[in-house]
Image (cartoon, grey):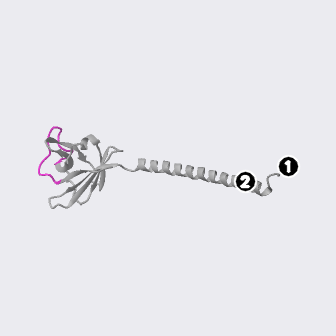
Amino acid sequence: MVEKKGVSGWWRAATIACVVLLSIGVASGVSVFEQFKAQVQHLQVQLKDTAQVKYIAVLNDENHAPALLVTMNLQDNALQIQRLNAVTEGREDSMQLWAMSDGDPVRSLGVLESKGKTLRLPATERDFASATSLAISVEDKGGARPGQGPRLPYLFKGSVIQKAL
């Protein structure tokens, strides 16, 4: 008769140790994957909340010194206008922003109502789609009447740059 030998205790211990190590490895992998997913979600929220500036223009004065920085934030549908010099309109005047494009008449983007360093004007991407340059004119208080063009010469003028997102 042949005697059956049982599996030695050493092999049982090695098998249990391997199963424990494999379980720890799987648990660690799942944990790292969940942390990675959480980081991706966090970064997606940050990206969504970050301004998506697509159009930029620096308007210069007659000496080619920067006077205004104009940016278009697509998420807010607004122009952000930052004054870079100390020029402000008089009591009876308003500064008005104009979009110009080749072959099209100039169109008003709005009147700068605030004398602050930074201000916003509502605008859509369509307002900028064909604009090649922006300009500021000095108009009577409240801006030019509808259908009336800007007074010339322009106070500040600059090219529109379309930035890749």
Element type at mark 2: helix
Secondary structure mainly formed by the magenta segment:
loop
Expressed as whole percent of the image width and height from the top left, the position of residue 18 reads 69, 54
Q: Residue at x 49, y 50 (%)?
A: 40
Q: Nearer the viewer, mark 2 or mark 1?
A: 1
Q: Amino acid at mark 1?
A: Val
Expressed as whole percent of the image width and height from the top left, the position of residue 109 reads 23, 44
Q: Residue at x 63, y 54 (%)?
A: 25
Q: Nearer the viewer, residue 153 or 133?
A: 133
Figure quadrant of residue 125? top left
In screen coordinates, is 42 left or right of 162? right
Q: Residue at x 70, y 52 (%)?
A: 19
Q: Is residue 14 found inside the magenta-colored segment of the image?
A: no
Q: Residue furthest front?
A: 1
Q: Which residues are magenta?
A: 139-156
**Mark 2 or mark 1, which has the lower sequence index?**
1
Residue annotated with mark 2: 15
Element type at mark 1: loop
Q: Amino acid at mark 2?
A: Thr
In screen coordinates, is 14 left or right of 78? right
Residue annotated with mark 1: 2
Q: Dot 1: within a 10 Å radius of its alpha carbon, few (fewer than 14), some, or many (20 or more) residues?
A: few
Q: Residue furthest top?
A: 147
Q: Is residue 152 found inside the magenta-colored segment of the image?
A: yes
Q: Residue at x 19, y 49 (%)?
A: 133
Check contact, mark 2 vs mark 1: CB within 8 A: no
Expressed as whole percent of the image width and height from the top left, the position of residue 49 reads 42, 48
